C-alpha cells in the first residue's frame, strides 16, 4: 500500500491574504484586551487592515481577510460559536456587503474615510439587528442605537484617517 500525497500550491495572493489576516487577527486580539467604556464599543482596529486590503487589492481579498479574522480571532479568544462570534460575523458580513457596494462609488468623492464610516455603521447595524432578533428580542435595544452609531461614526472617521495615511505612505 502506497501513501498518497496531496500537494497544495500556495500562490502569492494566498501568502498576501495570510499576512494581512495575521495583522488583522493580532489587532483584534489586542483590542479584546483593551478596556472599553461600554460593552460592544470598540475601535475596530482590525478594520484598518481590511479597508487597506480593499483599497489595494479589492473586495475579494478584503472579504477573505475579514472572514479569517472573525474565525481565527474567535477561536483564539475561546469564543468560537459563542454569541460574540455570531455578533462579530453579523457585523463583518454587513460591513462587507456595504463595502462591496460603496467600493464602486467614485474614488474622487468617496475615499478611505467615507468607506470606513460606511463599513463601521454597517457593522454596528448588523450586530444590533442580530442582537434584536436573537439575544434581546425587545425594542429596548433601540435605545442603544445613538450610542453605538456615534461610536461607529467616531471610530470610522479615525480608522479612515489612519488608512488614508497608510495608503499615502505605501504608494
Image (cartoon, rainbow, N blue to C red):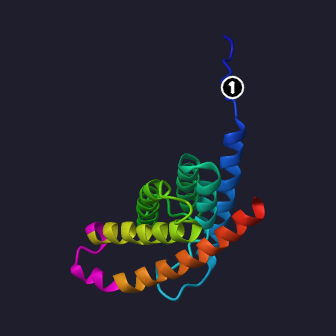
* Residue at point 48%, 82% (across, down): 151
Compared across the picture, whether 27 is left or right of 133 comes to right
Q: How many marks?
A: 1
Check the picture and name the quadrant holding the N terminus.
Answer: top right
Compared across the picture, whether 75 is left or right of 121 comes to right
In the image, residue 51 lies in the stretch drawn in magenta? no
Density class for disc 1 (Cα within 10 Å; few <14, some 14-19, many ≥20) is few
Q: Estimate the x, y position of residue 104 in percent, counting from the top left.
A: 48, 54
* Residue at point 70%, 63% (across, down): 167
The magenta region covers 133-144
Q: Estimate the x, y position of residue 159 in percent, counting from the top left.
A: 60, 73
Farthest residue to the top: give it.
1
Q: Taking 152 as reference, is 167 above or below it? A: above
Q: Taking 106 as reference, is 146 above or below it? A: below
* Residue at point 46%, 64% (across, down): 88
In the image, 18 versus 159, the foreground residue is 159
Farthest residue to the bottom: give it.
37
Check the picture and name the quadrant holding the C terminus.
Answer: bottom right
Q: Estimate the x, y position of residue 98 in percent, counting from the top left.
A: 42, 60
The residue at which mark 1 appears reads as 7
In the image, 38 versus 107, the foreground residue is 107
Asked which quadrant contains residue 26, the reply is bottom right
Amino acid at each position: 500500500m502506497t501513501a498518497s500525497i496531496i500537494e497544495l500550491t500556495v500562490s502569492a495572493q494566498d501568502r498576501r491574504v495570510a499576512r494581512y489576516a495575521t495583522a488583522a487577527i493580532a489587532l483584534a486580539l489586542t483590542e479584546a484586551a483593551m478596556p472599553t467604556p461600554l460593552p460592544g464599543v470598540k475601535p475596530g482596529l482590525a478594520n484598518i487592515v481590511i479597508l487597506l486590503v480593499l483599497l489595494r487589492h479589492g473586495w475579494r481579498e478584503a472579504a477573505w481577510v475579514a472572514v479569517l479574522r472573525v474565525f481565527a480571532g474567535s477561536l483564539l479568544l475561546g469564543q468560537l460559536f459563542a454569541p460574540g462570534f455570531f455578533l462579530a460575523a453579523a457585523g463583518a458580513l454587513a460591513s462587507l456587503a456595504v463595502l462591496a457596494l460603496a467600493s464602486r462609488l467614485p474614488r474622487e468623492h468617496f475615499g478611505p474615510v467615507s468607506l470606513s464610516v460606511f463599513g463601521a455603521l454597517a457593522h454596528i447595524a448588523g450586530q444590533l439587528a442580530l442582537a434584536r432578533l436573537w439575544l434581546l428580542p425587545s425594542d429596548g435595544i433601540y435605545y442603544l442605537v445613538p450610542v453605538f452609531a456615534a461610536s461607529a461614526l467616531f471610530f470610522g472617521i479615525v480608522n479612515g484617517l489612519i488608512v488614508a495615511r497608510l495608503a499615502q505612505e505605501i504608494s
